[in-house]
Amino acid sequence: MKVGIQGIEGSFSEEAAKSYCKKFGIEDFELKYLVSSMNVLNSLSNNSIDTGIFAMENAQGGVVIESVEALAKNQCQIIDMFYVEISQNLLAIDGVSVGDIEEIHSHEQALKQCKDYLAEKFWSKKLVEEDDTAKAAQDLAEGRLPKKVAVIASKFSAKKYGLNILENDIHDLKRNLTLFLAVKRLDS
């Protein structure tokens, strides 16, 4: 089964997809890293994936606007709705400490989920929205972002891309739950 996700390796959508497959005993699956909800639903419509998984709403950050827009333009059938607990972390490259940070990059949702933390610790720093938390981590690790940038992403992203976790669990809500949807093509 080809499962398309919003995000790349190290994303929360990857975690959600693996959780979904485990829940339904699906062992033979291939993940397609499609970055956005629109790409997931377009890939579903053109038959290049069998199932799509993407974030719909977060307890702190609210509705994921890109997912709403993608659903408005594509027809699909929702086959499962499930929650994943999200741990947002502040990541940086070797040699960069919290005091060195000049900008923070992440997905709009991650920035919303950490707004109180960011307002308290980084009120004077620029916040930059990226397409995906894990993509921001990859870009930082591969030198596509300035050295004094930090990203907000998963612990898995830190490990996958060789970044240091400067601070763990920086999201504002203790139980930071995100609702994910699993969708398939409409039966013709």
Image (cartoon, rainbow, N blue to C red):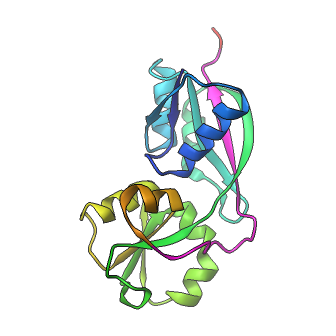
For residue 18, above or below residue 188? below
Quarter placement of the C terminus? top right
> Is there any visible trace of residue 68 in the rendered image?
no
**Relative depth, front residue between 21 and 144:** 21
Question: Residue 179 in magenta?
Answer: yes
For the point 35% across and 57% down, the residue is 138
For residue 114, above or below residue 28? below
- The quadrant in which residue 67 appears is top right
Question: Residue 123 in magenta?
Answer: no
Quarter placement of the N terminus? top right
Residue range of the region highlighted in magenta in the rendering: 165-186
Q: Residue furthest top?
A: 188
For the point 59% across and 69% down, the residue is 112
Where residue 152 appears, as percent x and y from the top left, is: 49, 68
Q: Residue furthest left?
A: 143
Where residue 31 appears, as percent x and y from the top left, is: 48, 32
**Relative depth, front residue between 20 and 117:** 20
**Relative depth, front residue between 86 and 164:** 164
Count every numbered label the image shows and give the total: 0
**Relative depth, front residue between 70 and 4:** 4
> Is there any visible trace of residue 42 in the rendered image?
yes
- The quadrant in which residue 21 appears is top right
